[in-house]
Image (cartoon, coloured by chain):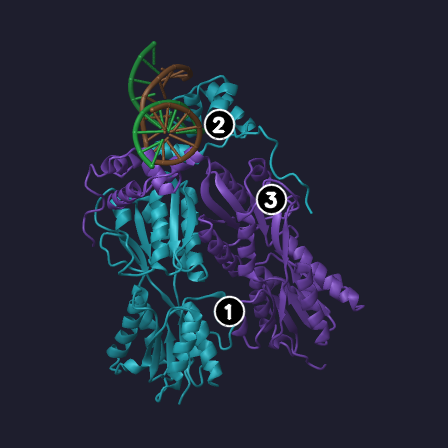
Chain colours: A purple, B cyan, C brown, D green
DNA sequence: GTGAAAGCGCTAACAC
DNA sequence: GTGTTAGCGCTTTCAC
């Protein structure tokens, strides 16, 4: 049990700018000027004001400033799944730039839900935040128009919104899919399956397109029965892989197009009594600490997650008033490991 | 390249309460009453106002409300490491309660840094947020006093602040340490190592205490050379485990006291050419999707992460004006898997 | 049940 | 350089 006190003595109240002004013997305007570094204030006064403010533990009241200035120095990062390490790594990149730009970052978790996403964007508008980095919940259904209408700078990351005129930082997902598949072909695999994601996400469509590119360029027939669509979550990856393995002509390799589904896929393969890479080779998407913990260690297509966040934040910081949308495309990197070593058959 | 338009036509401006009032032929006060469900407004007017507000796409301006009401309906969740899945799972629990309570949640990442933590708490104060859930960066150095002084309800999670009078939701870490160690003893291990965390965190101290409890209660001597302190990160876990394995009398089992360090520990064990559990048994802390992906699958002490967040949010929602601090302690659960199966020696 | 008016804390425009 | 004043958009008395 802690002590009974929970609240300060009644009558205690918060220091306002006027209190500081009075204590320092100046006007509120001067205090404001000193604390914001605007206008010319004599060194002597400046010093005195700063000291008094510190003594009184003065914290400017954010909402009052925002009301006056019509914006808040806050960026929102709207991510689709807070439990997906891909997104959290990206957030670090945004944060590091934001600090230097004197912006704060708040995180919003849309949970892949258009309703929650819209609710968060309303908040962005209601609070007059000064920028948004967003991984949209749906490439074609997410509605960013309210932000554009109101001048709020937006940078899309990871997923491409259909809406035009929006700055973006994306990974070349098509290339990633191509790299993964070509690597499997080179490893000697002949029936390569693909566990792809929801149609509403550009990442899923593009990784799948890359898979098809690789097959086509090497004159492999593309067999639709080898492609399974899931939800980018562990459970979906498990089920899709299981179904694929139980099909009449199962694959000898599988390209799993995101990190969480890879976990499910490995489980499904083991449950089927198969061994990687002897019975089936595997390439995942996204590198994570645990991909080298499995046996065999997993071959993956890695994304520059931190860099995505960093560049997105830089676009936000430098958003011009007008001009064409800016698009940054970063390269994925294939990291060959044990799950695709060549196994003669 | 997208189209050139980036900003709305000049003259476009945001709808304010006065615009709605005018369009509906009522006063601003009435619009406010309708939209906030306060005061008695006739059904007819109510309907008309609502309709007009919707047509004009009116969004109340948050800072103006906050200035008037002196609080914002926002809870801050201050976590120590956004890349640690333990914390992100917890956030989900907070969010789910917050929505029902009509509160928004913003996430702040202190990065285990007292300076960043203090900066975020200043923001909480400056913005007059209405509650904080915090995993402190340091049990004894984190300063929550500014929040208490200003009446901001605080709930500590995961880590216990030394400061008294603060509501908390913690896991019984001592019990968790005891369970892990007792399990290893029962599995036949005789020299059990412990990779613990930074002294500044109560979780590290308590898991270590549990480890010692288990040894003591079974009359095992506790050998300080078997205890290594690291930083709760992967790299630290690797180095500490490596050092332990290279010591003159290496352990036949190791209790690794958090999720990230467990990854490092497994790598160190493999690098030493040892096999789990034949050469060395292992118990980790925190269950994660990948703990069943390793071979052998890892025995862990699981924490009810989502539940920690949920209960913390409930405490926040029901924070009384005065009374003793409330403390919730949740039980950890040992999940026995293959990394500790009995191996006769 | 509704409107008029005051004021939340701050900053920017204007005086001096 | 510094002070005075007005007003940001909203809610909440207070009248009626």
Q: Is residue C12 above or below residue C6?
A: below
Between the residue at mark 3 and the residue at mark 1, the CA separation in whole angstroms equals: 31 Å
The percent position of residue A207, horizontal first and vertical second, equals 67, 60
Q: Would you name the residue on which mark 3 appears?
A: A142
Of marks 3 and 2, the one in the foreground: 2
Between the residue at mark 3 and the residue at mark 2, the CA separation in whole angstroms equals: 25 Å
Q: Would you name the residue on which mark 2 appears?
A: B16
Q: Would you name the residue on which mark 1 appears?
A: A289
A82 or A67, nearer to the observer: A67
A90 or C16, nearer to the observer: C16
Q: Is residue B28 above or below residue A8?
A: above
Q: Quadrant of residue A205?
A: bottom right
Judge whether residue A61 can be spotted in this image.
no
* C-beta proximity under 8 Å, tags 3 and 1: no
Residue B287: which disc?
A: none
Q: Secondary structure at mark 2?
A: loop
Q: Earlier in the sequence, mark 3 or mark 1?
A: 3
In the displayed structure, does residue B80 sit left or right of residue A84? left
Q: Is residue A146 above or below residue B51?
A: below
The percent position of residue B276, horizontal first and vertical second, equals 46, 81
* C-beta proximity under 8 Å, tags 3 and 2: no
Task: Report in which chain the residue with disc 1 lies.
Answer: A
């Amino acid at each position: 049990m802690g002590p009974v006190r929970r609240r300060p003595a009644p009558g205690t109240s918060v220091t306002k700018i006027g209190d500081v002004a009075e204590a320092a013997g100046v006007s509120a305007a001067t205090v404001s000027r000193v604390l914001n570094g605007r206008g010319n204030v004599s060194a002597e006064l400046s010093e005195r004001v700063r000291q008094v403010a510190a003594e009184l533990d003065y914290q400017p009241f954010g909402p009052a400033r925002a009301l006056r200035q019509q914006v808040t120095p806050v960026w929102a990062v709207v991510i689709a799944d807070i439990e997906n390490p891909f997104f959290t790594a990206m957030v670090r990149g945004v944060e590091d730039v934001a600090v230097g730009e004197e912006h704060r970052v708040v995180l919003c978790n849309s949970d892949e839900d258009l309703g929650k996403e819209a609710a968060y964007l309303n908040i962005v508008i209601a609070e007059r935040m000064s920028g948004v980095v967003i991984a949209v919940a749906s490439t074609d259904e997410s509605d960013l128009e309210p932000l554009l209408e109101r001048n709020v700078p937006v940078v899309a990351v990871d997923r491409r919104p259909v809406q035009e005129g929006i700055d973006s930082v994306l990974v070349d997902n098509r290339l990633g899919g191509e790299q993964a598949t070509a690597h499997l072909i080179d490893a000697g695999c002949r029936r390569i399956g693909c566990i792809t994601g929801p149609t509403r996400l550009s990442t899923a469509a593009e990784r799948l397109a890359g898979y098809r590119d690789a097959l086509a360029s090497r004159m492999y027939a593309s067999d639709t029965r080898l492609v399974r669509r899931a939800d980018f979550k562990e459970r979906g990856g498990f089920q899709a892989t299981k179904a694929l393995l139980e099909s009449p002509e199962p694959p000898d390799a599988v390209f799993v197009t995101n990190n969480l589904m890879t976990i499910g896929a490995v489980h499904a393969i083991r449950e089927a009594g198969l061994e990687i890479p002897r019975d089936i080779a595997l390439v995942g998407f996204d590198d994570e600490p645990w991909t080298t913990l499995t046996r065999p260690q997993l071959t993956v297509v890695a994304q520059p997650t931190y860099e995505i966040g960093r560049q997105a934040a830089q676009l936000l910081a430098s958003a011009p008033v007008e001009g064409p949308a800016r698009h940054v495309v970063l390269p994925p990197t294939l990291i060959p490991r044990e799950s695709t070593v060549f196994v003669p058959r």
